[in-house]
Amino acid sequence: MTVRPIRLFGDPVLKTVCDPAIPGENGFDDGVRSLVADLVDSVQLPGRAGVAANQIGATVRVFSYNVDGKVGYLINPEVVEVRGEKQPTGEGCLSVPGLWFETARHPWARAVGFDVDGNEVEVQGDGVLAQALQHETDHLNGMLYLDRLEKQSRREAMKQIRESDWF
């Protein structure tokens, strides 16, 4: 089991748009397979709903999720459908420890991607799963949930980050 350390706010890798993983004839190479294994191991610690590759220092489009006991991953994920008006939802991030802010998210989402063998995979759901699909895809696009906060909330978040013991 390889649980990788989480990169924290201020690390430039978190603002990096991740590159697609390129499949071969028999799926993805050993590097991508190893990254997936590390992401799945890393997301299984208590309190973790998702971990994106750039949160552990890799700039490849892969994330793992752990919601309601269901653990999985998507390679080259895309959120292809959302339903419902965005609603303020309490949200935090492993890369911004200790902060929790209302973030506008769609209540339902569907994402597609691939497994390590190159087979197309679809994940859909509501609640925390929908939130995780949107949150982790944002990470792979170089965006933190802080970037989605309204101006006053973002100002408060930045103040809390500056005052934190980890920054």
Image (tube, rainbow, N blue to C red):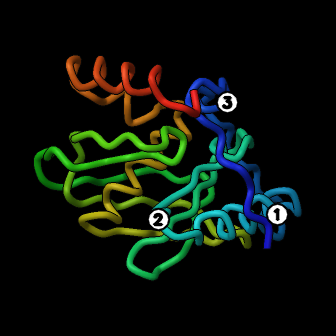
Which picture quadrant has residue 20?
top right
- Does label 2 or label 3 sit earlier along the sequence? 3
- Looking at the image, which residue sits at the far right? 30
What residue is at 24 percent from the left and 64 percent from the top? 127
Q: Hey, what amino acid is under mark 1?
A: Ser
Q: Hey, what amino acid is under mark 2?
A: Gly
Q: Depth check: 120 or 15 in front?
A: 15
State the image coordinates of residue 18 (x, y, percent, origin top left).
64, 36
Q: Depth check: 43 or 17 in front?
A: 43
- Residue placed under numbered mark 1 in the picture: 34
Apparent side of residue 64 relative to residue 109 in the rendered image (left or right):
right
Distance from disc 1 to disc 2, alpha carbons, whole Å, reads 23 Å
Q: Residues within 10 Å of mark 1 (few under 14, many from 20)?
A: few
Quarter of the image containing the N terminus?
bottom right
Question: Considering only vertical position in the picture, is 16 above or below 50?
Answer: above
Q: Nearer the viewer, mark 2 or mark 3?
A: 2
Q: Hey, what amino acid is under mark 3?
A: Val
- Residue placed under numbered mark 3 in the picture: 13
What residue is at 60 percent from the left and 30 percent from the top? 17
Q: How many marks do you count on the picture?
A: 3
Which picture quadrant has residue 29?
bottom right
- Does label 1 or label 3 sit earlier along the sequence? 3
Question: Considering only vertical position in the picture, is 153 above or below 60?
Answer: above
Q: Which of the labelled discs sits on residue 47, or is there none?
A: 2
